[in-house]
Image (cartoon, coloured by chain):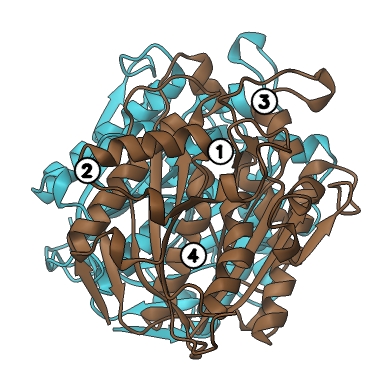
Chain colours: A brown, B cyan
Amino acid sequence: MVEKLGKSTYILKNKPSIVGYGSVVGIHEFEGPIGKEFDHFDSDCRFGEDSFEKAESRMQKIAMETALKRAKISENKIDLVFAGDLLNQCIGSTFCLRNTPIPFIGLYGACSTFTLSLALASITVNCNLTDYSMAITSSHFCSAERQYRFPLEYGSIRPQTSQRTTTGAGATVIGKGNTGIYVNAVSFGCIEDLGVTDANNMGAAMAPAAANTLKTYFQDTDTSVEDYDLIFTGDLGYIGTKLLYELLEMDRIDIRYRHNDCGLLIYDRNRQDVHSGGSGCGCSASVFNSFVINRLKNGEFKNILFMSTGALLSPTSTLQGETIPGIAHIVNVKSQTITPRQ
Amino acid sequence: MVEKLGKSTYILKNKPSIVGYGSVVGIHEFEGPIGKEFDHFDSDCRFGEDSFEKAESRMQKIAMETALKRAKISENKIDLVFAGDLLNQCIGSTFCLRNTPIPFIGLYGACSTFTLSLALASITVNCNLTDYSMAITSSHFCSAERQYRFPLEYGSIRPQTSQRTTTGAGATVIGKGNTGIYVNAVSFGCIEDLGVTDANNMGAAMAPAAANTLKTYFQDTDTSVEDYDLIFTGDLGYIGTKLLYELLEMDRIDIRYRHNDCGLLIYDRNRQDVHSGGSGCGCSASVFNSFVINRLKNGEFKNILFMSTGALLSPTSTLQGETIPGIAHIVNVKSQTITPRQ
């Protein structure tokens, strides 16, 4: 049912399928190069709520409802939901899911949380624990700025190495029905800390974990870059992506012609003021549940790796002079759809 | 391998065993009624570190090392670790586990996190995903006061309904070897919110979730109070416990003669200034990995329910006038040891 390869990788032999998905973003993301792919956006980022934190929960709710609608099931069919976000005490997720009839497992992996939740949702369906599991994560530029940096009203200037927290949410329903798109393997990463201390350069802090998780995955599965149509990273941004290439080159691995980063896909860095690119667990969640799944459905992608990366810092650890640990998890998603390439 | 009962409960037929465990507490907890049961304590709560946050990571490390020593394995034998704490961005866990060779899954369930991590660790061993999985959680009075309420130096007075965040950590290693003590079933709760808004009365906010998770468990498993030697709640404290009794009485369930609460066990409320009792995910973690396991080992307990409860608020949600959602998860632990009752 599950074949374990190496220490970190699990092949899910029952092919847990993606049966529903939904994506929601803010106006900035809607105006980006892949804006048309998202299911919903709101023009003022408040989604009808009176605080940014409540707006984030609202985004999760819309993503969840969209995913359930596509899956053609009601929320009481979901046996377990794996959810998380960047807000303190994960209130984006808990306030979205309170008083729903869905048993709740709260996760925290910073910007890696979406892949983590998708991996665990897939495992639970694969192992017959559940008929349907759901993964939901989100992030919001305004709530993240206030919590991690400064309230927007201060108008503080961020350095060019920094990334913009994506306003977005994504939800995926995993089930047993054969939709042709399934999670073939998952791999959980270890926490890497190479001593980066600059909280305005999280790409640099996350790149070592991304490199290690990817190398381990290739070793565990005895595959290489050429076996995949594309390798997505969650949100390393411009600087983190360059560092990932450099780190992998030390092991003679060259991913650059088969790689894209959700943080670079979602914005146009020449046109939009996003510095090193997008970040936040709503970034990989919204890109996966739109751009990526759309291309798995139309046959453009047959076999991809999707790796979200997280910087496990807190404002307190930074003030205490601590370095920034990073983590990365992988899901391998395959498509068997026979729709011709469009 | 797993039998699903109802919507929330999973019977783990492969009997994943508790093969190692460790507990660490602060001086206040060591001076409490069950102080002698803990493996380690520190007389000034800093555990040799220069901040309370680092002390919390250090506690997790000591708990982990103690558990590994009892399991007679090294850390590289652990296939997955499920860990969490109350600190923002879970830095208690991530800084404990950085640069270890253990794939890391970060969890957040407030004070329910220990049972959540133990449940997931047990499932992964039961389903042959891992040979060994570990659960670790912690909390620290001083880091929690600073983060959730006020720095200690302010000398603020808390109301009698409030609970004292326990300084403590606990780690459990789950494995396949038959030690006679195993996790028989787990049950995941939904998020309940009955509208409590007083952040100084978290027992009241958690009691509805505890009542619902327990009722659901009894229904799912077709068992009742009399089937268990004892039912532990994580940390409802004095007020939350009274409310739990009242809520269950509406369904004619009386647990009071077979119930204890970790938040009431760990302190002597008459002698120690702890108001409504202990709380924090280090409370149920340290009590489970000492007092509870000791009695499963000596045969005093054969069949218990252990339910940690969490209040899923944040200081921001409270300032925004939000109510406090609660959650509770259950593990059913059985002992087959034949050592005579001592």
| Cα distance in 3D space between marks 1 and 4 | 37 Å
Residue ID for mark 1: B277
Q: Is B89 or B3 nearer to us in this picture?
A: B89
How packed mark 4 is, by other alpha carbons closer than 10 Å (few <14, some 14-19, many 20 or more), is many
Q: Is B13 or B196 nearer to us in this picture?
A: B13
Note whether A81 is above or below B165 in the view shown: below
Q: Amino acid at mark 2?
A: Pro
Q: Amino acid at mark 3?
A: Arg
Q: Mark 3 or mark 2, which has the lower sequence index? A: 2
Q: Tell me the subunit letter for badge 2.
A: B
Q: Considering the numbered disc 4 on the image, is that residue within a helix, a strand or a loop? A: helix
| Cα distance in 3D space between marks 2 and 4 | 22 Å
Residue ID for mark 4: A118
| Cα distance in 3D space between marks 3 and 2 | 35 Å
From the viewer's perspective, tell me whether residue B16 is left or right of residue A228: left
Q: Tell me the subunit letter for badge 3.
A: B
| Cα distance in 3D space between marks 3 and 4 | 34 Å
Which circle marks residue B101 in the picture? 2
Q: Mark 1 or mark 2, which has the lower sequence index? A: 2
Q: Point out residue B277 in the picture as x, y percentages from the top left corner.
A: 56, 38
Quarter of the image for residue B22 reads: top left
Residue ID for mark 3: B149
Q: Amino acid at mark 1?
A: Gly
Please say if the residues under marks 1 and 4 sit with CB atoms less than 8 Å apart: no
Q: Considering the numbered disc 3 on the image, is that residue within a helix, a strand or a loop? A: loop
